Image (tube, rainbow, N blue to C red):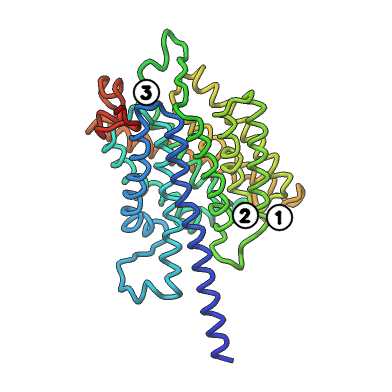
């Protein structure tokens, strides 16, 4: 019997490791989606820069999260002998890999907001600071119970803050960090003339659509594999992700009046919003959550660009920041058993936890980007911006002219 139990334990550890590894690879692939979504949206003279930023940001994120960020969030250090790290099929290492792909999504989100006028090396420095310190501080607070915040919320409101797959912890955090960076950078040259918005058309709609589809597919790893073990995996999470994606698509199609940019961001808005409560909601509630998010993105993107003169190139603040906030709140509403949800969630805790994430992200963004602006500068020169980041920074264009 003892040998049988050992064999069963070995199989369980192995399957859980493989399960989470598959999720990590799917979310890793989402970074290609971030890259192509940005490549298709920016002007052609900045496409190489977009691709270079996403890959470089991921590399820097890996280094700082491995040595600093993961330790801050979970108290785990990997500076141990390899035999120790290989225990249980190296599950701890695969968990790090999976959560790293979430952490690295933060600078990938920010990249879309500050595109076409941000300097390359200062942005890498910002990535290092954010992924090493700011993001893991909030991540550890909400996903590991650090500093007693979750215990206080549970004692005060009857349930802790719930964010199954990161509507607030990842997406709202990235979106509000990006807002601070966008405000400090200012708009691109020529974006607003005599108080009016000047259209900068996306350079490549097929690339934009490809980026959206890669993100959509990878998102099922993002959400479903957040269970972090095979026995905790739920078809409810998959169905809710699907319904929210469809809801966001349809509402963005209608609200955006067939605009392909809005259409292909609509499903992403729905998926951002459903992350938090995807394990609690009824599929109909997930559909509503996604539909609200799709319309919210279209409306807020239009208002932010046209009326508020906020030059957020990919609309990452409305897409991730505002739809992430909506997702945190929607979890508290539709997760209630009275509305067909699984229960065990408090709307008050969702409000407090979501607002806390917004405050930390905004303050952190202003500190990091404000410090870098003062010390080394954030923005390309007028001449560099005019000729584009591809030629001035990377010395090559996206398309050969020979």
Badge 3: residue crowd in 10 Å (few <14, some 14–19, many ≥20):
some
Task: Categorize mark 2 by other alpha carbons within 10 Å: few (<14), some (14-19), many (20+).
Answer: many
Badges 2 and 3: C-beta atoms under 8 Å apart? no
Q: Is residue 402 above or below residue 96?
A: above
Residue 186: image tag: 3
Going from N to C along the chain, the mark reached first, 1 or 3, is 3
The answer to whether mark 1 and mark 2 are in CB contact below 8 A is no
Mark 1, residue position? 342
Q: Nearer the viewer, mark 2 or mark 3?
A: 3
Q: Mark 1 or mark 2, which has the lower sequence index?
A: 2
SS state under label 1: loop
Q: Position of residue 184 (x, y in %)?
A: 35, 27
Q: Residue at x 67, y 49 (%)?
A: 240
From what the image shows, is residue 213 above or below residue 191? below
Task: Name the image quarter holding the C terminus.
Answer: top left
Which residue is denoted by mark 2 in the rendering? 159
- Looking at the image, the residue that sits furthest to the bottom is 1
Picture residue at 44% right of the left edge, 10% below the top: 195
For residue 189, above or below residue 133: above
């Amino acid at each position: 019997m003892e040998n049988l139990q050992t064999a069963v334990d070995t199989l369980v550890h192995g399957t859980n490791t493989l399960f989470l590894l598959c999720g990590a690879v799917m979310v890793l692939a989402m970074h290609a989606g971030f890259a192509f979504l940005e490549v298709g949206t920016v002007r052609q003279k900045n496409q190489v820069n977009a691709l270079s930023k996403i890959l470089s940001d991921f590399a820097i994120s890996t280094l700082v999260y491995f040595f600093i960020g993961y330790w801050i969030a979970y108290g785990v250090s990997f500076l141990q002998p390899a035999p120790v790290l290989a225990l249980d099929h190296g599950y701890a290492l695969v968990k790090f890999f999976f959560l790293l792909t979430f952490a690295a999504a933060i600078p990938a989100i920010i990249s879309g907001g500050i595109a076409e006028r941000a300097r390359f090396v200062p942005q890498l420095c910002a990535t290092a600071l954010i992924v090493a310190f700011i993001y893991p501080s909030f991540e550890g607070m909400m996903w590991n119970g650090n500093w007693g915040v979750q215990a206080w919320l549970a004692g005060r409101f009857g349930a802790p803050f719930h964010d199954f797959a990161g509507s607030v912890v990842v997406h709202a955090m990235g979106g509000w960090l990006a807002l601070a960076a966008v405000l400090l950078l200012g708009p691109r040259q020529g974006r607003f003339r005599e108080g009016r918005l000047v259209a900068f058309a996306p350079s490549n709609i097929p690339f934009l659509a490809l980026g959206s589809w890669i993100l959509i597919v990878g998102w099922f790893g993002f959400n479903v594999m957040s269970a972090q073990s095979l026995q905790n995996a739920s078809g409810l999470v998959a169905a809710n992700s699907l319904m929210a994606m469809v809801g966001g698509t349809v509402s963005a199609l209608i609200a955006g009046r067939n605009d392909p940019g809005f259409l292909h961001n609509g499903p992403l808005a729905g998926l951002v919003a459903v992350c938090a409560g995807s394990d609690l909601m009824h599929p109909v509630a997930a559909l509503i959550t996604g539909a609200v998010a799709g319309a919210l993105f279209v409306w807020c993107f239009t208002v932010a660009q046209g009326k508020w003169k906020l030059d957020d190139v990919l609309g990452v603040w409305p897409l991730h920041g505002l739809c992430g906030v909506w997702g945190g709140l929607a979890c508290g509403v539709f997760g209630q058993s009275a509305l067909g949800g699984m229960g065990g969630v408090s709307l008050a805790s969702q409000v407090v936890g979501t607002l806390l994430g917004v405050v930390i992200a905004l303050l952190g963004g202003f500190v990091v980007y404000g410090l870098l602006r003062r010390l080394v500068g954030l923005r390309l020169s007028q001449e560099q911006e005019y000729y584009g980041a591809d030629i001035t920074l990377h010395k090559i264009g996206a398309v050969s002219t020979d």
